[in-house]
Amino acid sequence: MTALRPLLPEDREAFQAFVRGLSAHARLNRFLAPIRELSPAALDALTRADQARHVALVATEDGRIVGEARYVALGTSGHAEFAVAVADGSQRSGIGARLLGALVHLARQAGLQVLEGEVLRTNEAMLRLLRRAGFHLSTCVGDARLARAERELSGV
């Protein structure tokens, strides 16, 4: 059974293991750069979410992290940037949709107006997920490799 919960600072090593366990392709899709693991500073920043302006969730199975989703509020604009990643062996099981749905719910509760992010155009599975979740996709100005995803949070 997959459980969703907040990512905690004590998840530092488990989160690094999650990142290391992603395929090179999945790490590129998540971080938009060819990394093998997170630097100590990046690991600290990503595992020390305040769960208010920086909300980070993980999906766990048998004590292992198999997915993560987060948003970071962008100043006082009412906008937040989001990211989602699911372990290769757990993709296409609904974990990404659950994580994204939870993010949308929490962002609405926090009074945010828009979730936005950038996705590699080659990341077809994420683009399909975002379309199904009501995100509008457009060309990313300045980088044709990326699609810009945006979802208004008011209303439905």
Image (cartoon, rainbow, N blue to C red):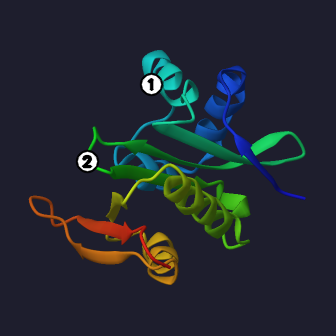
Disc on res. 42: 1
Disc on res. 77: 2
In the shown orientation, is residue 116 left or right of residue 69? left
- Amino acid identity at mark 1: Ala
Of the pair 152 and 96, the residue shown nearer to us: 152
Residue pictured at 47% horizontal, 56% vertical: 25
Residue 60 placement (x, y as % from top left): 79, 47
Residue pictured at 49% horizontal, 16% vertical: 40
Of the pair 24 and 135, the residue shown nearer to us: 135
Q: For the view shown, which residue lies furthest in the top direction? A: 40
Residue 92 placement (x, y as % from top left): 67, 73
Residue pictured at 54% horizontal, 28% vertical: 50
Mark with earlier residue (1, 2) = 1
- Amino acid identity at mark 2: Ser
Nearer the viewer's eye, disc 1 or disc 2?
2
Residue pictured at 34% horizontal, 59% vertical: 116
Circle 2 SS class: loop
Q: For label 1, count other residues whose C-alpha is less than 10 Å away and answer few (under 14), some (14-19) or many (20+).
A: few
Quadrant that contains the N terminus: bottom right
Residue 86 placement (x, y as % from top left): 62, 56
In the shown orientation, is residue 151 left or right of residue 59? left
